[in-house]
């Protein structure tokens, strides 16, 4: 039995987005989504049982925080797996928190893998994915490296992610840090509003079609096709938000300018496609071959914006157990 287990999980960016819940308690999605795990942003989490504390405790980057989702998640483990004493969770984020870079994905994937180690669970990745999903939907995909597909499923047992392609196909994501501020509308709220849009059923149908189109493009390592499909999927998600009930928009003027600049680069012959999550930051899809040239163009046009270069990242793993 271990005293302390440390796990690391990397964040992921969806190429086909998760943007709606069939069941908000269990995070059962309305659509199947597909992502690439990134190598640049991760969460490292250590867990230990602590008889000396009165409740489960989360210390995030050195400060104690009260996080309702984490408490609910640990309760879910107690009910589903086994009862256990109070847990001390110490977590470090190498992800800009809550600004559309899905720190909840890496956080709950790292917490799931660490807790599975501490509880000595012999769980398959699909089971870990299912548990991570209960913490945050996108965390189901961060269990895997490279490309993961989260099957929407029909219930708690059938909704989990699997590896879609465990191979680095040379896709690069350039992350433009437009803003590190906490987003004004959480993903959960945003999804709820989007689902009240008159156009939601059409978005679901388009997403299903896009998913079937992107699968062979990933297998064929066709970055241009992947980029075109992912960009369309992301922009239609944001267009949907503008018709939501009530409407909202994660875009800033800089977001719009970056998206337009990616389109301009593509028309000039470069591989450059935009994708965005629940925030104003833009991720530019390009290839490893063209990343330097594309980055140079963006830096020249947006000299005040910091950029990160990301490639495909590894799966979530226990790093230390003693
Ligand atoms: C995604 N996003 O597929 C989509 C695209 C944001 C936009 O998953 O409520 O933090 O915890 O299940 O996973 C962000 O939503 O939402 C997200 P919850 P989550 O990556």
Image: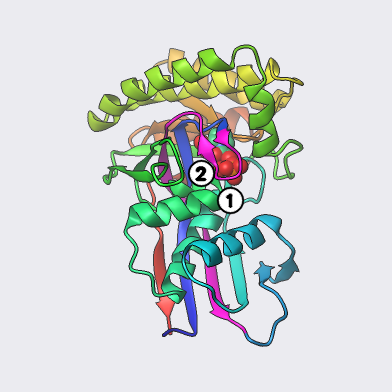
- Say few, some or many: other residues with alpha carbon within 10 Å of mark 1 (under 14 / 14 to 19 / 20 or more): many
- Give the labeled residue for mark 2: 138
**Which SS does the magenta portion mostly show?**
strand
**Earlier sequence position, callout 1 versus callout 2:** 1
The reply to whether the magenta stretch includes residue 171 is no
Q: Is residue 83 left or right of residue 280?
A: left
- The region drawn magenta spans 22-50
- Give the labeled residue for mark 1: 104
Identify the residue at horizontal 76%, vertical 37% (top origin). Answer: 184
Residue 96 seen in the current view = yes
Q: Against 104, is 254 above or below?
A: above
On-image quarter of the N terminus: bottom left
Residue 281 horizontal/vertical position (percent): 62, 35
Q: Helix, strand, or loop for circle 2?
A: helix
Q: Against 239, is 281 above or below?
A: below
Mark 1 Cβ and ligand 1 under 8 Å apart: yes
Q: Is residue 62 left or right of residue 25?
A: right
Contact (CB < 8 A) between labels 1 and 2? yes
Residue 216 location, quadrant:
top left
Q: Against 204, is 125 above or below?
A: below
**Mark 1 to mark 2 CA distance (whole Å):** 7 Å
Residue 270 seen in the current view = no
On-image quarter of the C terminus: bottom left
Mark 2 Cβ and ligand 1 under 8 Å apart: yes
Of residues 135 and 276, the one nearer the viewer is: 135
């Amino acid at each position: 039995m271990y005293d302390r287990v440390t796990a690391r999980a990397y964040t992921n960016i969806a190429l086909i987005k998760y943007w709606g819940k069939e069941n908000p308690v269990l995070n059962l999605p309305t659509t199947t989504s597909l992502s690439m795990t990134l190598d640049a942003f991760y969460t490292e989490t250590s867990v230990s049982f602590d008889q000396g504390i009165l409740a489960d405790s989360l210390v995030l980057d050195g400060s104690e925080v009260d996080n309702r989702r984490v408490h609910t998640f640990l309760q879910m483990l107690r009910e589903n797996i086994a009862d256990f004493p109070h847990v001390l969770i110490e977590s470090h984020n190498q992800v800009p928190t809550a600004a559309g870079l899905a720190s909840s994905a890496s956080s709950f994937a790292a917490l799931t893998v660490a807790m599975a180690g501490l509880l000595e669970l012999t769980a398959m990745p699909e089971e870990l994915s299912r548990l991570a999903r209960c913490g945050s939907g996108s965390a189901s995909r961060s269990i895997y490296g490279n490309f993961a597909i989260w099957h929407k499923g029909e219930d708690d047992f059938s909704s989990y992610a699997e590896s879609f392609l465990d191979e680095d196909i040379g896709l690069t994501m350039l992350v433009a840090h437009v803003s590190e501020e906490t987003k004004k509308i959480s993903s959960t709220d945003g999804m709820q509003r989007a689902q009240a849009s008159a156009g939601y059923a059409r978005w679901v149908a388009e997403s299903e079609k896009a998913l079937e189109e992107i699968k062979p493009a990933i297998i064929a390592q066709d970055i241009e096709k992947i980029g075109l499909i992912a960009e369309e999927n992301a922009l239609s998600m944001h267009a949907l938000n503008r018709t939501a009930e009530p409407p909202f928009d994660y875009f800033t003027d800089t977001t719009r300018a970056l998206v337009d600049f990616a389109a301009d680069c593509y028309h000039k012959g470069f591989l450059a496609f935009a994708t965005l999550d629940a925030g104003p930051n833009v991720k530019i899809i390009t290839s490893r071959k063209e990343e330097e040239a594309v980055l140079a163009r963006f830096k020249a046009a947006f000299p005040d914006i910091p950029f990160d270069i990301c490639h495909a990242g590894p799966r979530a793993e226990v790093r230390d157990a003693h």
